[in-house]
Amino acid sequence: MAPSTHVCRIVDLSEVGLTDVGLAGCKGANLGEMIAAGLPVPAGFVITAEAARRAKDSVCASTLPTALEEVLQRRYLLVPDGEVAVRSSATAEDSTNTSFAGMNETFTNVREPELLQRIIDCWESLFGERVASYRIDRKPFDEPAIAVSMQQMVAWTEPTSCSRSTPLHAI
């Protein structure tokens, strides 16, 4: 990942890769790899797991540090349609013994009034009942950490074969 001097540790998805799972989470790191491979990935950035750790006390009070709020609001204003996906990205989603994929919160079609709360909701989901129970059962060794990626929502106009009730090739 490119070195970041910003206190809030927000980096573009294009700046992370598989070596950055500890900061960007599995989803964020994989999105960065897809961008590096030239695949079409909606524009976005990741609020690193480090930022979540630094904001832990604020999150417990359901607020974000002021500096982080200001940066997020500036970044949000750059989104063309103003509609984003706020996606959890745990740093230990998949391993040989665990699969946390899908257990933490992710939100689509988020607009500014709810943006900051949805980021907090993603962070708080790391300690939700379902995730905590699974963690107790699987006994992972690492301290739980989560990053949050935010990406521009992309409207689709053509259904894919997966979303059609009768795929063309099945007729």
Image (cartoon, helix red, strand yellow):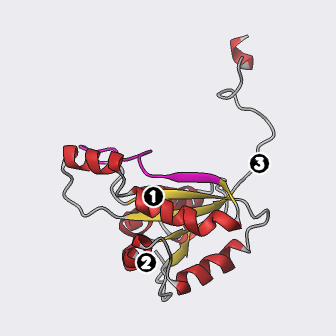
Q: Residues within 10 Å of mark 3 (few under 14, many from 20)?
A: few
Q: Residues within 10 Å of mark 2 (few under 14, many from 20)?
A: some
Determine the residue positioned at 47% across, 70% down.
62
Q: What type is the residue that disc 1 sits on?
A: Ser
Indicate which disc residue 155 carries. 3
Of the residues tagged 2 and 1, which is closer to the observer? 2
Marks 3/2: CA distance? Answer: 34 Å
Q: What type is the residue that disc 3 sits on?
A: Ala
Determine the residue positioned at 52% across, 76% down.
10
Place of residue 41 in the rendered image (x, y in percent of width and height, measured from the top left)? 64, 55
Indicate which disc residue 89 carries. 1
| Label 2 sits on residue | 58
Place of residue 162 in the rendered image (x, y in percent of width and height, measured from the top left)? 64, 28
Q: Which residues are magenta?
A: 95-108
Determine the residue positioned at 48% across, 57% down.
88
Place of residue 70 in the rendered image (x, y in percent of width and height, measured from the top left)? 61, 83
Counting residues from the start of the chain, the first of labels 3 and 2 encountered is 2
Determine the residue positioned at 29% across, 51% down.
132
